[in-house]
Amino acid sequence: MTTLEDRLASVRASIADAARDAERNPAEITTIVVTKFQPASLVAELAGLGVRDFGENRHQEAQAKAAALADLDLTWHFVGQLQSKKARQVRAYASVIHSVDRPSLVEALRSDEASVDTLVQVNLTPDPARGGVQPDEVEQLVEQMLGTPGLRLRGLMAVAPLGEPARPAFARVRLLSERVRVMAPDATWLSMGMTEDFREAILEGATHLRIGTAITGNRPDAG
Ligand SMILES: *Cc1c(COP(=O)(O)O)cnc(C)c1O
């Protein structure tokens, strides 16, 4: 049995290795620990080990954990598919929404309040159920986001497709991000890389890794 602390240290070492191989500074890579299906007590334990950034993919669960742990001053990242009618509630606790993928959701995030950081989720498969906008629709969505108050576009997010090598898929996201930065120079974030493929993501320029089970261990539920 390894402990949470062992697994966190081992993932941090692998991130540092990959960053070295990519000739990148590991300090410019943010590790978000994805704690979906995990209890708030595990999040608190990770916070005690120095983790600040946490990812969740379901609104009710995320809202409950953010409320229970409000005194820890953590940064919450919403990484799941988001219903437009939940958008306002999510921006109340999330610092970053990684999964903006359609015009109606951009409209639902419109606000006169302080801006929430957002990423466009790119779908690297033809399957709409996987979430994300198709690559050829990204620029149009970016244009809409740049004209919408209440959100700040920070970059792109993607999940590697199943059953094909991750690295060329991440390379496509990197190229797409160069096109987006012509329109939005501040959109420099690349949220990609999970337990199975964070090394490949780092080699392709990921700035934000979303890592769950490699750190938390298996999820209590089928997640
Ligand atoms: C669950 C999840 C992760 C983390 O997955 P692991 O394979 O456990 O590292 C990352 N990103 C998203 C969008 C997720 O839903």
Image (cartoon, rainbow, N blue to C red):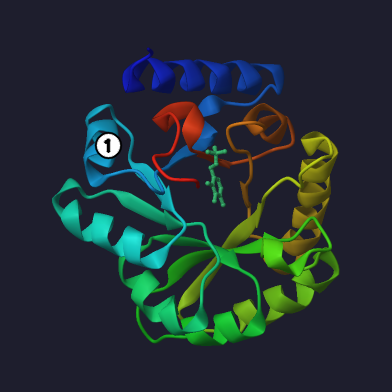
Q: Position of residue 213 (x, y in %)?
A: 48, 33
Give me the residue at 80% from left, 73% from top: 137
Quadrant hosting residue 187:
bottom right
The image quadrant in which ligand 1 is located: top right
Drawn side of residue 86 relative to residue 205, left or right = left
Give me the residue at 42% from left, 85% from top: 111
Give me the residue at 51% from left, 77% from top: 83
Q: Is residue 132 visible?
A: no
Quadrant placement of the N terminus: top left
Drawn side of residue 70 relative to residue 113, left or right = left
Disc 1 designates what residue?
Answer: 42
Q: Is mark 1 within 8 Å of ligand 1?
A: no
In this rendering, the count of numbered labels is: 1
> Looking at the image, is 191 positioned above or below residue 96?
above
Q: In front here: 78 or 115? A: 78
> Looking at the image, is 51 positioned above or below residue 82?
above
Q: Amino acid at mark 1?
A: Leu
Drawn side of residue 144 relative to residue 221, left or right = right
Q: Position of residue 220 (x, y in %)?
A: 39, 40
Give me the residue at 75% from left, 69% from top: 128
Quadrant hosting residue 105:
bottom right
Q: Is residue 97 visible?
A: yes
